[in-house]
Image (tube, grey):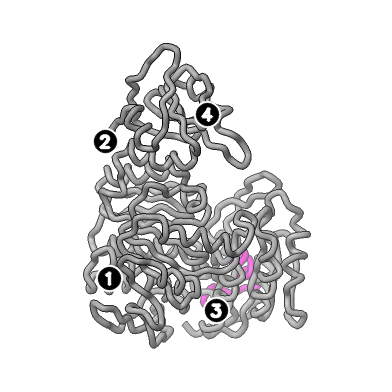
Amino acid sequence: MAISSKSVQQLADVVGGSLVAPETGQIEVSVVDVTHDSRQAGSGILFVAIRGALADGHGFVSGAVAAGSPAVCVDHPTGSAVMEIVVPDTRSALGPLAASVHGDPSQAMKVVGVTGTNGKTTVTHYIESITSSAGLSTGLIGTIHTRIGDEAVRSVHTTPEASDFQRLLARMRDNGAELAAVEVSSHALELGRVAATTFAVAAFTNFSQDHLDFHGDMDSYRAAKMKLFDEYEVGTAVVNIDDEVGKEIARSFHGSLLRVGEDGEIRRGGLTPTARGTSFRLTTPWGSVELTAPVLGSFNVDNAVLAAACSLAAGLDFDEVVSGLQSLEGVPGRFEVVSGDDSVRVIVDYAHTPEGILEAVTTARGLGGRRVIALVGAGGDRDQAKRPLMGSAVSRADLAIVTSDNPRSEDPAAIADAVVSGLDISTESIVDLDRSSAISKAINAADDGDIVLILGRGHEPLQEVAGEMRPFDDREVAREALSRRWMSAGSAPGSGSMDR
């Protein structure tokens, strides 16, 4: 990575902070990186003390100084032995400080930010797939992983903290990236994690209930999503206007706008399932075409069309986008078929909201199976109000299996009871808090031609139970259950009658 540096005075000017010099009177300080984590503090690294929900970073200033940080950013003078940049709100200063130190990397490439309740991961992966197929060097930041060139690192947050986010963009720029597709969560927008970022394209997928444990109510959640379009420098907004919040964004946004949806400039029609995915007609201001994309379900076609719109807004040619759509790469844990040629189709998906579960069940119905068996569980220490709604949504399946997701610090039985309270009384259901056992029951309950949906965790390789992270990948567990089913039945995969 190319190393740049800024003086502490330059950085103070960026955030309008005042400088407090130590007793030594040292003023000439060079900064090459910024961190909010005192464990990453060291020579040339500015430590920014953030007041978090669990800890106050000001309590770690002395540790950062001891580790070698030449300067700190605080919201009040602490009397440390280094230069202090004093600002009213250190969290608001973190992004601009990091962006400045790293040379404002978002201005050196096209950053495409995607927000919304559902679909962010799939849309960003599809953008990466389309733009990479067109020959662009592309980076990715999101829920599953961050990818820079050939390097992929598993993600901790959907959108990293501002100092990490700007450092990643800088690494992408220095690696030759021309475009970065990034997920922008509501947490990130509320906490300023993408502050000081210029978005060539900002996209909105949809809006439904989630994260009320953090935002408190739907109005606050909606307001957080809209910040991307109201408070940031955006070249073109790409908005799903089939969603009511999308319509609101489209009405209020004053810049270049591409509307995606039934009445939009970019729309799709004539969906037909095929052996290779879904055929549909794509209509845009740049041209129209009939094509087949290797995706299942109308919601994934919508994700693909939104990704196509973002790619067009980023400057790709229409023919390049069409070619990219026809060769889209699958997204781990997003409506991922894990059953191979088995006569029972088993699909793992990340759906963990009422809307997402309903979409998954509805899509499975459209695949032509006999019955739909759906397994769900709600995450602990998260939005409790959505749990009965999740039960209501999974009632659309022929058999609903309620189990544990990531219970975290909560009682798994209490979580399951809340989900079960929303089940339709006429829906056949099973409750099994052991997720591995529940997955086996779902698969063993299936007959040839049935579709099994394992929902909620998608790609996640670990399950969080009572503070412990346990290895658990739904896809691996499902494959093992399928293998046991084959052995028990004395038949090989592909011996069933499901029409492919």
Give the total of numbered labels: 4
Please name the residue shown 24% across and 47% down the image. Answer: 176
Residue at the disc numbered 2: 2
Callout 2: helix, strand or loop? loop
Q: Height in image: 68 above or below 378? A: above
Of mark 3 and mark 1, the one earlier in the sequence is 1
Residue 201 spot, x, y in % from top left: 33, 61
Residue at mark 3 to residue at mark 1: CA–CA distance: 27 Å
Is residue 192 a member of the stretch shown in magenta? no
Residue at mark 4 to residue at mark 1: CA–CA distance: 51 Å
Residue at the disc numbered 3: 364
Residue 455 quadrant:
bottom right
| Image marks 3 and 1: residues in contact by CB distance under 8 Å | no
Please name the residue shown 53% across and 36% down the image. Answer: 50
Rendered image: mark on residue 321: 1
Residue at mark 4 to residue at mark 3: CA–CA distance: 56 Å
Q: Amino acid at mark 3?
A: Ala
| Image marks 2 and 4: residues in contact by CB distance under 8 Å | no
Q: Amino acid at mark 4?
A: His
User: Which of the two marks, 4 or 1, is nearer to us in this view?
Assistant: 4
Q: Residue furthest top?
A: 24
Q: Which residues are magenta?
A: 480-495
Residue 431 quadrant:
bottom right
Q: Amino acid at mark 1?
A: Val
Residue at the disc numbered 4: 76
